[in-house]
Amino acid sequence: MKNIFKSPEKNNSLGICLSGGGALGFAHIGVLQSLEEHGIYPTHIVGSSMGAVVGTLYAAGYSPAEMLQLIKEDKLYKVTKLMTFRPTFSRSGLSTHTMLRSLIRELIPHNSFEQLQKKLYICVVNLNKAEWEIVDTGSKLDKWVAASASIPAVFETIKLDDIFYIDGGLLNNMPAQAIENVCPTIIGVDVIPHRVPTELKKPIDTLVYAVRAVQFQNSKAGRNLCRFIIEPKAIEEYNVFSFDAYQAIYGYGYDAANKYIENNPEIMKLVK
């Protein structure tokens, strides 16, 4: 692993990189809660897919507790709340991001990167160029969040200036590269860590592990830039569509962060 750790005294910026992972991304909220309880407050956030959704709310000033409350109020957890289904093959996806974009505009009325309380970077995939990109400016925050979370074939693609954008996690699920030259220390949170398959009973099992293997390979460069990496294990019991299990998944993130801090006391040097 490439070690880019530098003394925090030289630069007080602290980055956090939040991976994609659908419902498993609710673990990010638990991790953020644990970090804050230990006095660790990231100043720069970068995320893909669900990591971008959680990261955007955090950058806007919503506390982990407030985000959890939003979930309990049905605003963030039910698939039917996040998706507006249009089951037809004449469109680019089975669902639109109407609800998610409306929610972002409701919770963050200014809809602007520049007016967020913390610096935010969102990873998307530019289908025209077949490359991942980082977006961190402009007044179309809701569109970029939706683009980053547009799972191929599930959600419609987002089109901006004749360019089609989809889920950032497809090509870079840990986009720490966005902040490597800004933050001397980056904390990574990967909710889809590599898992060795034990049994592959059905074709879908093989497909899932194959997709995860590709994602893990695409995440390696970003992971290597993180000084600390927290890996909640909710994936061992739940999947990317387990939205109803938000409380348990949050708990996985909270417990994983607490255990990581206990086993890696050097992270406490980041306390301000």
Image (spheres, helix red, strand yellow):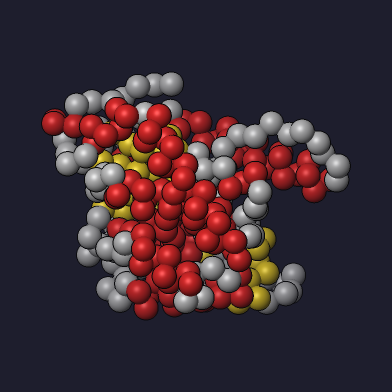
Quarter containing the N terminus: top left
Question: Which percent across, then down, holds residue 199?
Answer: 81, 36
Identified at 64% across, 60% down, the residue is 241
Question: Which percent across, then down, holds residue 196?
Answer: 69, 31
140 lies above or below 240: below
The part of the image, by quadrant, that contains residue 65 is bottom left
Q: Is residue 92 visible?
A: no
Q: How many marks?
A: 0
Q: Is residue 183 visible?
A: yes
Query: In terms of depth relative to the viewer, which is nearer, 245 or 103?
Result: 245
Quarter containing the C terminus: top left
Residue 35 appears left or right of 252: left
The part of the image, by quadrant, that contains residue 209 is top right
The part of the image, by quadrant, that contains residue 222 is top left
Query: In terms of depth relative to the viewer, which is nearer, 256 or 75?
Result: 256
Residue 122 appears left or right of 241: left
Question: Which percent across, then down, holds residue 225?
Answer: 38, 30
Residue 4 appears left or right of 99: left
Identified at 42% across, 35% down, the residue is 260
11 lies above or below 90: above
Query: In terms of depth relative to the viewer, which is nearer, 235 or 4?
Result: 235
Identified at 54% across, 54% down, the residue is 249
Identified at 38% across, 33% down, the residue is 262
